[in-house]
Image (cartoon, rainbow, N blue to C red):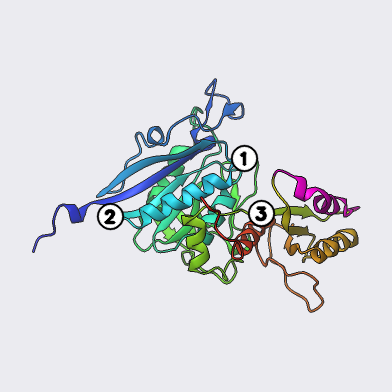
Amino acid sequence: MMKSEQSEVRRLVVLGTGGTIAGRAASAGDNLGYTAGEVGVADLLAGIGAPSGVTLVAEQVAQLDSKDMSFDVWHQLAQRCMHWSNVPDVIGIVITHGTDTLEETAFFLHSVLPAEKPVALTCAMRPASALAPDGPQNVRDAIAVAATAGARGVTVVCAGTIHSAIDVQKVHTYRLDAFASGDAGPLGYVEEGAVRRLRDWPGALDANAGTAGLDAAIKLKVISTDVEWPRVEIIMSHAGATGAVIDALMAHGAEDAAGPVRGLILAATGNGTLHHAIEAAAARAHAAGIEIRRATRCVNGRILPRGDDTWPDAGGLSPVKARIALMLELMLASPPVSA
């Protein structure tokens, strides 16, 4: 029995959010003085061919500089990813994104989406108007990843390298290969449209991801309902530190438009160590009901717990990812916002 023509249709969805990859400058020689989020995602796909038997579908979710990424856009992205993931003929999703907060968006999506289909985020360090833009090749590579048989989970594809959303960090201010995966190393590479994988695709729940305790209920809650995003702030420990910032947050947080602080991520030195003044201020905050987590400032490595640790650690998560993990944790106890 011959398969119907409809059953042969395979689609790959490209969601646009803006960023440098969609940026324009007044001159082609200017790679810095551009405005992000000027080119629509459909235009970004012009001239980029799809793999054989695959049709590309473009959808604009947002158009912003990723330094200004918001919870609302995260919510929309999660909803659109879930929608398209549930469409049978959609084989994968690509998201074009700015580099500044790409690792945060990737980790958020990793934390709330099921891992059945691939979601590949990509970006550019040069605007679309550049003499030699890097965006088109990055988009091609991300499409190759999302179209690869057996691919799953959330990845970041940049400069021919595939990173897991769990490990990826932006590590350079202007170089085209601005991302790295620390000690874990990349998931693989894209070489002339072919994926060479070095390790497993990221799973929905990873023991090292810091969000292994999140079940399907919280994921569905974050995606399908309007939730109250708990306020979690990051405090860095450093030489000569004081507890003044923590004390100020505690004293004035309730009056702030962002609402009261519910959690603190302490960006600790080395293996999770903290300046004594930060430690004392954190203890006062915890006594007032604030959740505390430690993450390391170090780019590589993870916090190895000791028996005398005062505060739980975030393992290998960076401070910004630990913040997302704690926010999601706190949402477990928060009711949906009524319409």
Identify the residue at image location x=59%, y=49%: 179
Q: Position of residue 95 (x, y in %)?
A: 45, 46
Identify the residue at image location x=78%, y=63%: 270
Label 3 vs 1, first from the N-terminus: 1
Residue type at the position of mark 1: Lys
Helix, strand or loop status at disc 1: helix
Label 2 vs 1, first from the N-terminus: 1
Q: Position of residue 139 (x, y in %)?
A: 43, 43
Q: CA distance from mark 2 to mark 1?
A: 34 Å
Q: What is the number of the mark on residue 320?
A: 3
Identify the residue at image location x=59%, y=57%: 181
Q: Give the residue at mark 1.
A: 67
Residue type at the position of mark 2: Asp
Q: Give the residue at mark 2.
A: 89
What secondary structure is the stretch in magenta mostly built from?
helix
Report the label total: 3
- In which quadrant is the N terminus drawn? bottom left
Residue type at the position of mark 3: Val
**Region rendered in magenta:** 240-257
